[in-house]
Image: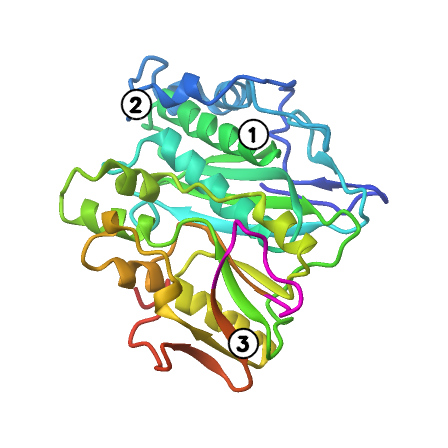
Amino acid sequence: MLRAAAGVRGAHSAGHGYGHGVRTGPDGAGMDRVAKRERGGTGRMGTIGELGEFGLIGRLTRGLPRGADVRLGPGDDAAVVAAPDGRVVATTDLLVEGRHFRRDWSGPYDIGRKAAAQNLADVVAMGARPTALLVGFAAPPSTDADWAVRLYDGLADECRRAGASVAGGDVVGAPGITLAVTALGDLGGGRPLTRSGARPGDVVAVRGRLGYASAGWALLAEGRDGPPELLDAHRRPEPPYEAGAEAREAGATALLDVSDGLVQDLGHIAAASGVRIDVDSATLVVPEVLGPDGLRHVLTGGEDHGFAGTFPPDSPPPPSWTVIGSVREGDGVRVDGRVPDATGWDHFRG
């Protein structure tokens, strides 16, 4: 059972700390030790059913990164994570096998990296610094224990990229594999960057890759084996975690991560802010590797977890950002003056 409790000022207690007497310490091991392993489970530790709940918890929590923000990690009924700002940014996502990942397309390490990245990116999109993840892991007892361990290696290494830690979670047997990931973050005394701050006259800019993950998904669906950089982008997004701090320092008025498609996600800013957003397709970066449908992938493809934001005209975005449009009075999103036929992903419509 996953439990959370509000804590004392300056810290909060969160999650079920894999509370079965197992504790972890800092681990500075790099990502390469896992990235070089082959995909899939080897079964050398047997199954998670044979390992048992407590044995699995002990193996999964061994070597998890623990930064200064985690005051009490796995080993008690709940973790304790520092909240010096007095506020906690929190977000959660579900990843369901067959819906969000396929084991014949992605290895466990990649799935772990992706699960962490999409949640950490949401924290960054609020202008916050990621501090910790809580991970719920459901899987059939027949799952290779080695597969589960390498899943957690991926979670841990993505946390290292973002400066966060895996603070706790829960494990349970289930018919299929599901991950429930909650990410926490700290605003450092600043205001949250929401979707509702865009104003007419602002410029629209993006940071990070767009379209790569979508193009990679299309290649995998067609049974193709390249280009590798597109397949890897689908399996393992690489959010530019520094984007949140960059946007805040530049005076961004609104910010979000591009998870469901650029047009659709800009539509969330437009709706929340009561404005119209115009995108100039000529300003979009459409690499040749994306193929003949490159512009469509950039406009409607999600899961790259780049960032889109709006900035005042007298406070332009940093050079690492690309200006792609403007904010006007009105509503909705226009691309080259027209309402686009497609916008992006909807979990209930496909």
* Residue 43 drawn at (x, y percent): 30, 17
Q: Secondary structure at mark 1?
A: helix
Q: Which mark is residue 273?
A: none
The residue tagged 1 is: 160
Q: Residue at x 25, y 38 (%)?
A: 105
Of pointers 2 and 3, the one earlier in the residue sequence: 2
65 and 148: which is toward the camera: 65
Q: Amino acid at mark 1?
A: Arg
The reply, left or right, for residue 120 in relation to residue 47 is: right
* Residue 116 drawn at (x, y percent): 49, 40
45 and 63: which is toward the camera: 63
* Comparing labels 2 and 3, the label whose residue is closer to the camera: 3
Q: Residue at x 52, y 49 (%)?
A: 320
Q: Is residue 113 above or below residue 266?
A: above
Quarter-of-image position of residue 203: bottom right
* Residue 287 drawn at (x, y percent): 29, 51
Report the magenta stretch's main SS: loop
Q: Secondary structure at mark 3?
A: strand
The reply, left or right, for residue 291 in relation to residue 75 is: left
* Comparing labels 3 and 1, the label whose residue is closer to the camera: 3
The residue tagged 3 is: 327
Q: Amino acid at mark 2?
A: Gly
Q: Please provide the residue range marked out in magenta.
A: 311-323
Q: From this viewpoint, which residue is outermost toward the bottom?
A: 330
Q: Residue at x 57, y 36 (%)?
A: 162
The residue tagged 2 is: 41
Of pointers 3 and 1, the one earlier in the residue sequence: 1
